[in-house]
Amino acid sequence: MKKAHLIGIVIIAIAIGVIMSTLSDSSTYADFSEAFANPGQEFHVVGKLNKSKESIYHPSENPNLFTFFMNDNKGEEKKVILHKSKPQDFERSEQIVLIGKADGSEFHATEILMKCPSKYNDGKGKLWGG
């Protein structure tokens, strides 16, 4: 076998190893029951803010601590602790995606993505008045 072939095989093996390690570290979409069944693993949990319960944010005490309750898509409710400041227009969000891990009876989020009502949507499913 030529040296070039051996080098090519080694490069391919390294590339496969990098891809596999990236895939094993990536988080997956889940509901709260799956996230709490695997407490050390990072998940994306999709749900809606429970507006009937209080959200707590005191920026003068800790600007990187925001606590609220969320129901996942299956209706299970959990207390969420976001280790960032409260997002703007948080209460207006239609859907929330949390990125984080289960810890005890709480979900500790490091990131939050929100789907807010579109300012271009008239509320009837039509865009741009058409």
Image (cartoon, helix red, strand yellow):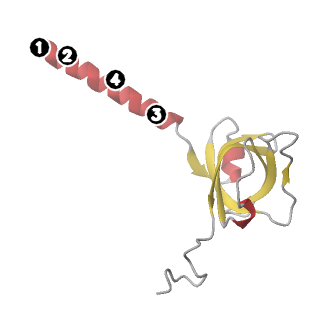
Residue in the image at 50% along x and 80% along y: 127
User: Whole-Å distance between the Cαs marked 4 and 1?
Assistant: 19 Å
Q: Position of residue 120 (x, y in %)?
A: 55, 75
| Residue 14, disc | 4
**Which numbered tag is attached to residue 6?**
2
Instruction: Name the residue at 67% across, 35% down.
Output: 40
Residue 77 appearing in the image: no
- Marks 1 and 3 close (CB-CB < 8 Å): no
Cα–Cα span, label 4 and label 3:
12 Å
Q: Give the residue type at disc 4.
A: Ile
Query: Which residue position holds label 3?
Result: 22
Residue behind mark 1: 2
Please tell me which of labels 3 and 2 falls first in the chain. Answer: 2
- Callout 4–callout 2 Cβ contact below 8 Å: no
Sequence-wise first label, 4 or 3: 4
Task: From the viewer's perspective, tell me whether residue 80 is left or right of residue 29.
Answer: right
